[in-house]
């Protein structure tokens, strides 16, 4: 972890720590298997590492370490293991003290949720969530972050399934879905272009999510006061495969032209207009590919006195109408004196009517999948 922290910060990046499998999930779902053994083969009957003790490490690379400090004491599925929960809390606090992460995220909720499992895990039947530990972890992390930053709180803590009364105390995390309206408090969509764990079949079949979806999705999330945490799953040797490199190249090319409308921006009075504003209201988890963004889908961001309108496509007729910026609009009552297309080499022709801000577009878009307009009054 220390190496990751040094590399990230030496390159001007923020450093985050993620915990995937907090105490209740771990002691119920994953740990009991560590007390079993193979039923066939040359190691049949040899206990897994969960049964080993500190004495078993004599003369081995892990000498002096107690496996049960990692695995918890042997226990039945569904049986609490307070010692493990305490160790988990201490490990989180140690990571906070040692590496002062800028982001601390948990793949768990701020309330208990019963997971009945499914075809791949029919015997799951476990409780997930850390409502009992969340307040203590949050207080410890925020207090440490304030001390590190000279009295300013700059740390971000993410949790899922957060009750509304405490929305302002952390960042709500939406796994593979998104908020359907502009949110007062910052939030985050957590998404992946493939499977959460690297799957070579996704690469071989070329079925990663495309930049044509993920770039408009990112814009949509940001316009609603959100952040997109995007996972690029890595194979065992630690480097993205060629399809992932191509995806990241498209994302970098788009940011090269449009980052002004994204980085350091704040949401506007409304987040957008267009048909996809309604589609998002019915979107269940893990159905992001159902989103169909059109050139008439416009999203807004602001920076100072500048308004950015980002069209999530390129109109085939060479004309874009932004209805929310019509003459006498309650959203933008002042005059518009300048409209520019980021990345364009020539000036735009535009008019403002009672129907909207009508923009004549150049022959070719300056970027793929979404284009950004700088609007000044």
Image (spheres, rainbow, N blue to C red):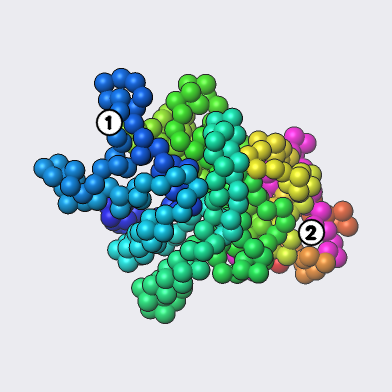
Comparing 200 with 30, the one in front is: 30
Magenta stretch encompasses residue 324: yes
The magenta region covers 302-329
> Residue 376: x and y, percent?
68, 64
Magenta stretch encompasses residue 360: no
Residue at 42% over, 68% down: 141
On the question of residue 372 being in view, the answer is no
Q: Residues within 10 Å of mark 1 (few under 14, many from 20)?
A: few
Give above or below for 125 relative to 341: above
212 displayed left or right of 272: left
Q: Which residue is mark 1?
A: 46
Give above or below for 238 relative to 27: above
Comparing 66 with 10, the one in front is: 66
Q: Which residue is mark 2?
A: 325
Snapshot quadrant of residue 242: top left
The secondary structure type at the circle numbered 1 is loop
């Amino acid at each position: 972890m220390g190496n990751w922290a040094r590399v990230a910060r030496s390159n001007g990046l923020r450093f985050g720590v993620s915990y995937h499998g907090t105490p209740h999930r771990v002691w119920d779902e994953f740990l009991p298997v560590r007390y079993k053994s193979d039923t066939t083969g040359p190691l049949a009957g040899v206990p897994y590492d969960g049964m080993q003790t500190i004495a078993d490490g004599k003369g081995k690379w892990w000498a002096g370490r107690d496996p049960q400090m990692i695995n918890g004491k042997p226990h039945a599925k569904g049986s609490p293991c307070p010692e493990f929960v305490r160790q988990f809390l201490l490990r989180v606090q140690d990571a906070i003290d040692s590496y002062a992460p800028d982001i601390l995220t948990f793949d768990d909720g701020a309330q208990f949720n019963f997971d009945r499992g499914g075809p791949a895990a029919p015997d799951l039947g476990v409780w997930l969530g850390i409502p009992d530990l969340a307040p203590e972890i949050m207080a410890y992390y925020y207090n440490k972050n304030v001390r590190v930053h000279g009295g300013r709180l700059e740390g971000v803590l993410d949790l899922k399934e957060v009750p509304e009364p405490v929305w302002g105390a952390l960042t709500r995390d939406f796994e593979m879905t998104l908020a359907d309206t502009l949110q007062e408090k910052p939030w985050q969509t957590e998404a992946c272009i493939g499977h959460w764990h690297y799957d070579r079949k996704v690469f071989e079949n070329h079925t990663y999510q495309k930049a044509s979806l993920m770039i408009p999705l990112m814009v949509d999330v940001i316009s609603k006061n959100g952040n997109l945490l995007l996972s690029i799953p890595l194979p065992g040797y630690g480097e993205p495969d060629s399809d992932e490199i191509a995806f990241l190249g498209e994302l970098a090319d788009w940011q090269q032209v449009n980052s002004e409308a994204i980085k350091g921006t704040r949401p506007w009075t409304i987040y957008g207009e267009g048909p996809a504003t309604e589609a998002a209201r019915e979107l269940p988890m893990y159905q992001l590919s159902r989103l169909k963004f059109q050139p008439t889908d416009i999203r807004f961001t602001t920076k100072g006195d500048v308004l950015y309108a980002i069209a999530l496509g390129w109109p085939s007729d060479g004309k874009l109408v932004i209805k929310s910026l019509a003459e006498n609009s309650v959203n933008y009552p002042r005059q518009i004196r300048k409209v520019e297309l980021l990345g364009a080499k020539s000036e735009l022709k535009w008019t403002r009517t009672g129907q909207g801000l009508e923009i004549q577009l150049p022959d070719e878009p300056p970027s793929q999948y979404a284009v950004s307009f700088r609007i000044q009054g």
